[in-house]
Image (cartoon, helix red, strand yellow):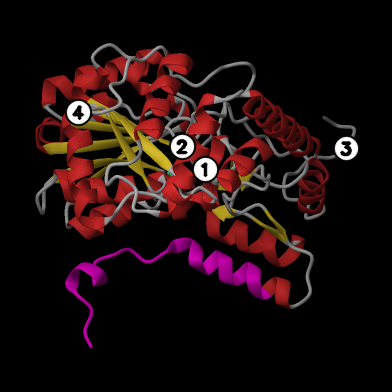
Amino acid sequence: MEFSNRLNNLPSQFFATLVKKVGDAVLEGRDVINLGQGNPDQPTPPHIVQAVQEAAANPLNHKYSPFRGTGDFKKAASNFYKREYNVDIDPETEVAILFGTKIGLVELPLALMNEHELMLLPDPGYPDYLSGVGLANVEFNTMPLLGENNFLPDYSSLTEQQKQQAKLMYLNYPNNPTGAIANLDFFQETVTLAKENDIAIVHDFAYGGIGFDGVKPVSFLQADGAKDVGIEMYTLSKTYNMAGWRVGFAVGNSKIIEAINIIQDHLFVSIFPAVQDAATVALNDSQACVKELVDLYEGRRNALVEACTSIGWKVTAPKGSFFAWLPVPDNYTSEAFADLLLQEADVAVAAGNGFGSTGEGYVRVGLLVDEDRLKEAITRIGKLNLFGYVKGKG
Ligand SMILES: Cc1ncc(COP(=O)(O)O)c(C=O)c1O
């Protein structure tokens, strides 16, 4: 049987190869330190687990959920935005419940765009954005995120044609893979661009809970007029270590929210109500667990940067997310360097070009193992003597 053109159109999963290589190395009995993936290593906080256990025992939760999610969860999302960002959100018209934000990001082009219309995507960027491009059969142009611009897109380098044709733009700060954060000025500039050129904006705020050095990442919706042009997607996967639970939401522009809700009315009945109840608890209750998690990641980040410096690897400390974006030594491509680290040091990292061609020259390291393992990984890399650093000579 032939697959549909739509299915054949989907991009191949770049990181499937990495998963296979790491799996093979582990099968050979090697002690691989896997820094290549983005799966939170900590458990969901106990009060959230307890909430789902209690909610699962409630027969009311064994029925179909309301199609567009429970009122309590939508109110919790609204309260969360008011409390954390001082943004007003109408729970009924400005919130859409998502089975994790991956689904929202992938289904949105189907809901908002016609075939061959133009989307703007960050490069490097979260690879699953391209799944939405493939499914909806739309065109995309990339916006390079360069170190010299603090990994923000430079809107002045968009052509008039790109600005006029683009219908949808995705942004993501704190950024996967670069660990960069955005400020309110940048989001304000984004709103202006969007208004002038009628571009819908989606800010993927997956790492919104994780900012370092006392800096709380800003929400796109804090910019004046942001709700006129866009939405923000927020996942519970990272802030509360709930990646396996599949729960998140989108908030903002009511027209875009309606588009998500309509497509979801046809694709799903909403999430298991017990999960929505527990997600409500996560958003409403004490946020002490989030602070603890950020402190943990910040400790790991500091350990990583210190270890890199000690072997002569000049790196920039990420400002948010749980990733570090590290430059590869001269004369290596990202993939050649990642392969070398896996073969010679039993350390797995993600090659930067897997996130887009602008990612060439970098590898992404996840802060998702404990400090000792992180240091051990860098010690092993140091033994390869790639950075021309002689101890005692600075
Ligand atoms: C940038 C970014 N956006 C979205 C997601 C999707 O998160 P989820 O589907 O778990 O909500 C991820 C997950 O890794 C991510 O890194």
Extreme residue toward the bottom, this view: 1
- Left of 160 or right of it: where is 80? right
Q: Is residue 214 visible?
A: yes
Q: Horizontal placement of 319 versus 313: left or right?
A: left
Q: What is the magenta segment's predominant secondary structure?
A: helix
Is 290 part of what is drawn in magenta? no
First of labels 3, 1 by sequence position:
1
| Amino acid at pointer 4 | Ser
Q: Are marks 1 and 4 in contact (CB under 8 Å)?
A: no
In whole angstroms, how far apart are the C-alphas of marks 4 and 3? Answer: 59 Å
Tell which tag, 4 or 2, sits nearer the viewer: 4
Residue 385, horizontal then vertical, whole percent: 78, 51
Coordinates of residue 283 in the picture (x, y in percent): 51, 29
Query: Where does label 4 land, which residue?
Result: 254
Look at the image and give the residue range highlighted in magenta.
1-24
**Who comes first in sequence, dot 4 or dot 2?**
2
Looking at the picture, which amino acid does disc 3 mark?
Answer: Lys
Q: Residue at x 69, y 29 (%)?
A: 298
* CA distance separating discs 4 and 2: 20 Å
Look at the numbered discs 2 and 3 and tell me whether their residues touch, using CB distance below 8 Å.
Answer: no
Front position among marks 3 and 1: 1
| Residue 116 at x, y percent in the picture | 11, 52
| SS label for mark 4 | helix
Q: Is residue 133 left or right of residue 242?
A: left
Q: Which callout, 1 or 4, points at the residue further toward the start of the chain? A: 1
Within-10-Å neighbours for mark 2: few <14, some 14–19, many 20+: many
Q: Is mark 1 within 8 Å of ligand 1?
A: yes
Task: State which tag comes first along the sequence, 2 or 3.
Answer: 2
Q: Secondary structure at mark 3?
A: loop
Label 2, on which residue?
206
